[in-house]
Image (spheres, coloured by chain):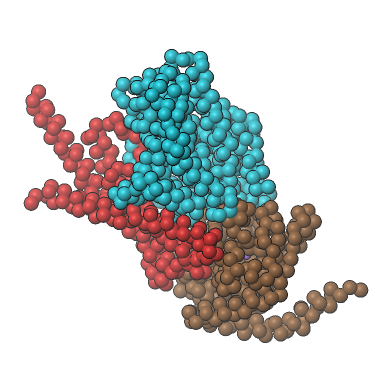
Chain colours: A cyan, B brown, C red
């Protein structure tokens, strides 16, 4: 029976590739398997009756309420031109230095990614805003698109991030389960807040490495990086502050509310969204029409996310009914080489799945299956969460299927060749892999801050 | 076929039954979560394998708060949970778990099994097609973990605490702010100060949860949960389909687990308390007498308000408080007096 | 009126109803943001708090994604793995969507509807209220949203079916015309 669950996994991947919406591909395929199983006596129909309870569990899940709140915040920032203003100001500030624009793009992208956390939005916005300017100034297309793509995916890892909210929810139950399976009855918990804190150091390292790379290119491959725009140096300090403050204020609001004990992580998302609204109002960028667009976009993204959740829940119910969990446990238990091999295997699998699945699907379909087993081996849940997040971020950058590449391709001018984009992201992928290796070698990079922050 | 064998007692003893049990806790969660596993082991042994019960942790098959519906609908045959989670379906259910300043474990068991409590419980669950059994008890809990000292009623005012159920209503009456939190947010929120206090269970579970890392003061006693009863619920049709001997095995196994959990908590709590005090230097304190008095007064008010809202609640509460009144008179001269006497230093 | 324009009319009606519904519930996202902010301000600024207020955000949230999903389907914003899909012809895309709607989407919604019906009715019979003390008393309404979700998704599925079959028919006509010219 257990092997049917494996077959189900293979079939669902094939169905997904046809391109029908993911949520229904997952749920529909699972139901067909269950239906055939019920008719042939291989599947107990009682499992299916758990469905309404599972749906209601999703409807009432308190942690996930952070999702629409963060999405709202991100869409407000996108519509209110916060990013655009910021980029213009930074360009004027750094414009007269060689590579200045690229540095601006990375810094702005990092700030924007931090405050929104929506990969697609960041890549598209940065692509629309900065790619034409970079090309006009004479940046090599590969270098320009690579920087934009890589920066756009930072939203995954720099808190606050929806990816981490969702991962936190899944990991916290996986962690409970793992500890109890280990027989050591110390059900400590890991929360979204812990993941946020754990992501701060790796996120900063990543941004620093990106900047370092830009400086090195400027130094060693000056033909890729023009010296430019003497007219662009007359930015006033108030203008700069005006542009720089909004995203900083928001990050400070959200993280400050959580760390300072003013709000739970979910509530902090609401604080951030309100902050974004206020900023947009102050900057006179919020008309009723824009507000309606924001609300409608938020509704659509939220529906999309939660429909996948529902699909994944139905899939995993049937998967469990066929004994899939036992199968995965057996697989991991029979692995030679212990913890290292297991982590490596999971990371490779997630990396490959990142080509065809969105992070939401990976978080809800794959992580619940593998995380309890890994955590039961004694792995730190915060470390695992950040490793998965960075790994997915890398996967989204990797040609030919990376999602960030699709997004940028969508908004890049025809003159930019797809192969330029592919070439451009390679160095950034190398940087990401370096970070992954570093985190594997020195887990303290992730765990030190959470352990010491609360004293 | 099954229908035919059920009329033939000899054949019936050959038939085997595979049940599923969903629970409101992670599998093997210390104390609470061990009960379903223990039950399953007992039943399998006693029945010689004719009745097996596969246990699912919270969220594996259905979320923890969906146990009642899953058993009621017949998705699974039984569940392990706490009756006070079903307040939204039947207000009276709360009383079968515990009420603020209510009876302790020994007294509640007496009420349930010899004071008419169990009959009322069955009556309340009957419309849902469920048969309840007492399924364990944690004993008197602790008042909770506080980041601030509680020296007077003023210290309760504006205090943000995770305290669910009727206890939360009472706490609110004194000016406290009950906050609803998920398990995953609880620890971080207490650590960061997003909440000032939380109740949990008692030393055994609280030590394991690491709450001493997030708050300095550990207050007693658990006025809000003086002897919470957990429950096994069995789908009526599934139960009736069992032959008499297996029915008896189910019933006896629940009784055994009910006592077993109290024994485990009594043993583990006292060792965990030593560890909290000696190894982790936790400041353990009694809530001040005037705070307790105010809480007691507010509790009586809350119980009267709730009784006015729901006739069944009123009926069950009357039975409960009448029993409590009488049993406390006796325990005043037996248990209470004895505790006092044995602690006299020679 | 022929049958084709009847079905197109039905499809447009479904589209319009769901569009209005989505616009309506989209306001709830704003309310969610403001109420959450208010909860924080009241709790930390004024020492006030109500469980019912915390729960109201959950109710709004559930309404948003359960009733906004149909229009999201209409505007094609439910994420797809579009490695191959994006390169397909209009006609092939229409085939994928037709088959997907018939074999995946509609069965799933029917199944949710069938299995959840009793579950929701039972909640109505007891007018189920919150499991939390001081919580909202409308759990039966919240549960009913699951049924409404399944119904609206199936209706939208019907609209998608009509739209895609028309695309297939239309492109067949074009194919035939092309052949005729050759
Ligand atoms: Na972010
Ligand atoms: Na408790």
x, y percent for residue B20: 53, 58
Between residues B127 and C66, which one lies in front from this camera angle?
C66
Residue B158 in view here: yes
The total number of labels drawn is 0
x, y percent for residue A83: 40, 37
Q: Residue at x 34, y 34 (%)?
A: C82
Is C137 displayed left or right of A176 in the figure?
left
Q: Is residue A106 above or below residue C35?
A: above
Between residues A196 and B10, which one lies in front from this camera angle?
A196
Is C107 displayed left or right of B274 in the figure?
left
Is A95 displayed left or right of B178 in the figure?
left
Q: Is residue A113 above or below residue A416?
A: below
Q: Is residue C100 above or below residue C137?
A: above
Q: Quadrant of residue A442?
A: top right
Between residues B3 and A261, which one lies in front from this camera angle?
A261
- Quadrant for the C terminus of chain B, please: bottom right
Q: Is residue C95 above or below residue B67?
A: above
Q: Quadrant of residue B258?
A: bottom right
Q: Residue at x 35, y 32 (%)?
A: A128
x, y percent for residue C73: 30, 46
Residue A327 in view here: no
- Quadrant for the N terminus of chain B, please: bottom left
Q: Residue at x 38, y 54 (%)?
A: C29
Q: Residue at x 61, y 52 (%)?
A: B192
x, y percent for residue B170: 58, 73
């Amino acid at each position: 029976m257990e092997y049917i669950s494996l077959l189900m996994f293979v079939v669902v991947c094939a169905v997904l590739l046809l391109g029908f919406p993911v949520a229904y591909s997952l749920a529909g395929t699972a139901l067909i398997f269950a239906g055939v199983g019920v008719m042939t006596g291989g599947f107990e129909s009682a499992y299916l009756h758990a469905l309404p309870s599972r749906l209601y569990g999703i409807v009432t899940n308190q942690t996930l309420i952070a999702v629409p709140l963060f999405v709202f915040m991100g869409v407000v920032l996108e519509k209110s031109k916060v990013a655009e203003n910021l980029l213009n100001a930074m360009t004027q500030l750094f414009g007269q230095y060689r590579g200045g624009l690229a540095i601006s793009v990375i810094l702005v992208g990092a700030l924007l990614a931090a405050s929104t956390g929506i990969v697609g939005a960041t890549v598209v916005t940065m692509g629309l805003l900065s790619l034409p300017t970079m090309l006009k100034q004479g940046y090599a297309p590969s270098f320009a698109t690579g920087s934009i793509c890589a920066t756009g995916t930072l939203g995954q890892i720099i808190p606050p991030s929806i990816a981490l909210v969702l991962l936190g929810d899944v990991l916290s139950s996986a962690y409970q389960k793992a500890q109890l399976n280990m027989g050591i009855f110390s059900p400590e918990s890991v929360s979204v807040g812990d993941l946020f804190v754990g992501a701060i150091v790796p996120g900063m390292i990543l941004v620093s490495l990106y900047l370092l790379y830009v400086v090195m290119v400027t130094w060693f491959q000056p033909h890729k990086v023009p010296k430019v725009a003497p007219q662009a140096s007359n930015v006033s300090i108030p203008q700069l502050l005006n542009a720089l403050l909004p995203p900083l204020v928001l990050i400070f609001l959200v993280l400050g509310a959580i760390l300072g004990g003013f709000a739970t992580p979910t509530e902090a998302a609401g604080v951030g969204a309100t902050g974004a609204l206020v900023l947009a109002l102050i900057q006179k960028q919020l008309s009723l029409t824009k507000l309606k667009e924001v609300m409608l976009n938020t509704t659509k993204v939220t529906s999309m996310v939660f429909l996948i959740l529902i699909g994944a829940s139905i899939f995993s119910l049937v998967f469990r009914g066929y004994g899939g969990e036992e199968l995965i446990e057996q697989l991991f238990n029979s692995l030679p080489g212990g913890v290292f091999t297991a982590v490596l295997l999971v990371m490779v699998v997630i990396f490959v799945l990142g080509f065809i699945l969105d992070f939401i699907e990976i978080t809800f379909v794959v992580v619940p299956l593998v995380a309890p087993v890994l955590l039961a081996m004694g792995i730190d849940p915060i470390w695992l969460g950040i490793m998965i997040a960075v790994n997915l971020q890398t996967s989204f950058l990797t040609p030919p299927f990376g999602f960030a590449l699709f997004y940028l391709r969508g908004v890049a001018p025809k003159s930019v060749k797809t192969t330029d984009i592919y070439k451009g992201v390679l160095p950034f992928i190398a940087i990401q892999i370096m970070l992954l290796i570093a985190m594997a070698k020195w887990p303290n990079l992730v765990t030190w801050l959470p352990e010491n922050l609360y004293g | 076929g099954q229908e035919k064998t059920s009329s033939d007692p000899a054949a019936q003893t050959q038939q085997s039954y595979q049940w599923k049990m969903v629970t409101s806790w992670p599998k093997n969660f210390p104390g609470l979560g061990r009960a379903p596993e223990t039950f399953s082991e007992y039943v399998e042994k006693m029945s010689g394998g004719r009745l097996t019960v596969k246990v699912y942790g919270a969220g594996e098959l259905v979320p923890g708060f969906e146990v009642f519906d899953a058993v009621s609908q017949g998705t699974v045959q039984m569940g392990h949970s706490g009756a006070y989670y079903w307040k939204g379906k039947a207000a009276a259910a709360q009383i079968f778990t515990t009420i603020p300043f209510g009876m302790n474990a020994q007294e509640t068991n007496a009420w349930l099994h010899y004071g008419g409590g169990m009959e009322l419980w069955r009556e309340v669950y009957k419309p849902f097609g469920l048969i309840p059994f007492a399924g364990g008890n944690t004993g008197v809990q602790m008042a909770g973990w506080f980041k601030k000292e509680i020296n007077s009623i003023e210290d309760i005012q504006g205090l943000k605490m995770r305290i669910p159920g009727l206890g939360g209503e009472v706490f609110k009456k004194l000016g406290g702010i009950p906050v609803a939190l998920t398990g995953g947010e609880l620890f971080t929120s207490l650590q960061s100060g997003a909440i000032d206090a939380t109740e949990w269970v008692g030393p055994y579970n609280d030590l394991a949860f690491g709450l001493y890392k997030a708050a300095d003061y550990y207050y007693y006693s658990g006025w809000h949960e003086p002897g919470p009863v957990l429950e096994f619920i069995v789908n009526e049709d599934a139960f009736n389909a069992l032959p008499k001997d297996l029915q008896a095995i189910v019933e006896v196994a629940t009784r055994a687990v009910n006592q077993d959990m109290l024994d485990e908590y009594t043993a583990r709590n006292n060792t965990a308390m030593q560890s909290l005090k000696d190894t982790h230097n936790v400041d353990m304190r009694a809530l001040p007498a005037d705070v307790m008095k105010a809480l007691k007064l507010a509790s009586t008010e809350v119980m009267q308000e709730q009784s006015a809202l729901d006739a069944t609640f009123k009926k069950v509460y009357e039975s409960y408080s009448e029993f409590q009144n009488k049993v406390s008179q006796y325990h005043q001269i037996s248990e209470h007096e004895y505790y006092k006497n044995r602690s006299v230093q020679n | 009126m022929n049958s084709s324009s009847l079905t197109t009319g039905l499809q447009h009606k479904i589209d319009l109803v769901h569009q209005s519904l989505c616009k309506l519930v989209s306001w709830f996202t704003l309310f969610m943001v403001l109420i959450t902010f208010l909860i924080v301000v009241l709790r930390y600024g004024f020492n006030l708090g109500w469980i019912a207020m915390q729960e109201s955000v959950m109710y709004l949230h559930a309404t948003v994604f359960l009733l906004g999903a149909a229009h999201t389907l209409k505007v094609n914003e439910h994420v797809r793995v579009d490695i191959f899909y994006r390169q397909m012809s209009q006609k092939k895309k229409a085939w994928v969507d037709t088959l997907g709607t018939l074999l995946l989407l509609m069965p799933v919604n029917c199944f949710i509807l069938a299995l959840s019906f009793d579950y929701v009715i039972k909640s109505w019979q007891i007018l189920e209220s919150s499991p939390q003390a001081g919580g909202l008393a409308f759990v039966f309404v919240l549960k009913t949203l699951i049924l409404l979700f399944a119904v609206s998704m199936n209706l939208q599925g019907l609209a998608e079916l009509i739209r895609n079959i028309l695309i297939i028919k239309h492109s067949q006509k074009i194919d035939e015309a092309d052949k005729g010219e050759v």
